[in-house]
Image: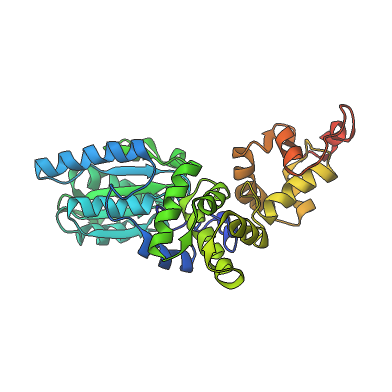
Amino acid sequence: MNWDETAPATADDARSGRLVGADADGEDQAVEAALRPKDLGEFVGQERVREQLDLVLKAARQRGGTADHVLLSGAPGLGKTTLSMIIAAEMGAPIRITSGPAIQHAGDLAAILSSLTEGEVLFLDEIHRMSRPAEEMLYMAMEDFRVDVIVGKGPGATAIPLELPPFTLVGATTRAGLLPPPLRDRFGFTGHMEFYAPAELERVIHRSAGLLDVSIEPEGAGEIAGRSRGTPRIANRLLRRVRDYAQVKADGVITREIAARALDVYDVDGRGLDRLDRAVLTALLKLFGGGPVGLSTLAVAVGEERETVEEVAEPFLVREGLLARTPRGRVATPAAWTHLGLTPPQQGGAGAQQGLFEG
């Protein structure tokens, strides 16, 4: 229900094809358009951000002006694009959607800004990946609603000021730390999107099941929520795959047993780990005694690129407390041994020798 429509084209694209990947593919985007909430009242989760944003929008409507510029940060799939559309709907304004990587030149941004209408919402996804010249043009546009268009080159170049109608910029980023301070300071409201609790995901799943005309029991929704890695987009994707299984292998009703069997078929275990996640943990535990082991060595052991292991598998494993990054290398936690049903080696055993694998 609450998720992002666009996704960054980085090494994280290795997630494509993963059932538990947080980026959206073509199928996700088509389904998400139908499931998106239309106002803040329908939006599930992110209670603090919703409450704060509601005040910002209500105050802007009472003043009869445009809302302050909004910056939304957080992992993919948590609802940044959805909130941008809700902002436009709550303000009764149209929305223009683009992304940082699509704006490579200042002229690209000038063309977009000059075509905005008064009060329009401009949603700029992955804003931290915008080119530097466009970024510097955006400073003036956000603060003074004006841009200087450079005509000509060299000594004969002339700056022509172009007045812009008041608009609201909604910037979204998965890496807020990469935003330069001058840009970050020009946003009137900043909201950080948190991962969802299982109970919140159950509400998301029940709502989506109703819109998709899927029969689901509370225990079935709980089983899917527990494997959704705290992300609504993943919850909805798992719901669709479990729906397919229930339709073909059962009577169409999603129970806890049906959900568990379906997700086992798709290699998503009880904590939301998939094949890649388990391969990384298995190599770390069985081949290297739990570590420490260098990232390059670990990547070779699982037959993946270093970037894939570091950017695709590790963030969730670290967040789940199954893996730790240390100066000497990657180390498995006691929870990792327990999750895979293995017994950790005795102190001074194989794991103590893994400094050989650093690098």
How many marks on residues?
0
- Residue name at image x 63 percent, y 46 percent: 271
**Point 27% across, 40% down: residue:** 53
The colour scheme is rainbow
Residue lying furthest top = 347
Horizontally, is 243 left or right of 1 in the view? Answer: right
In the rendered image of this protein, does residue 193 appear above or below residue 327?
Answer: below
Decide if residue 82 is on the left or right side of residue 199.
left
In this view, the residue farthest toward the right is: 349
Vertical order, 82 against 349 (above or below): below
Spot occupied by residue 134 in the image (x, y as percentages of width and height):
34, 52
Judging depth in this view, the residue of 102 and 148 nearest the camera is 102
- Quadrant for the C terminus, please: top right
Q: Quadrant of residue 176?
A: top left
Q: Residue 97 appears at what percent x and percent y?
A: 32, 59
Tell which of 247 and 179 is nearer to you: 247
In the rendered view of the protein, which quadrant contains the N terminus?
A: bottom left
Where, by quadrant of the figure, is residue 266 drawn? bottom right
Between residue 205 and residue 75, name the one nearer to us.
Answer: 205
| Residue drawn at the location 83% of the way across and 37% of the way down | 343
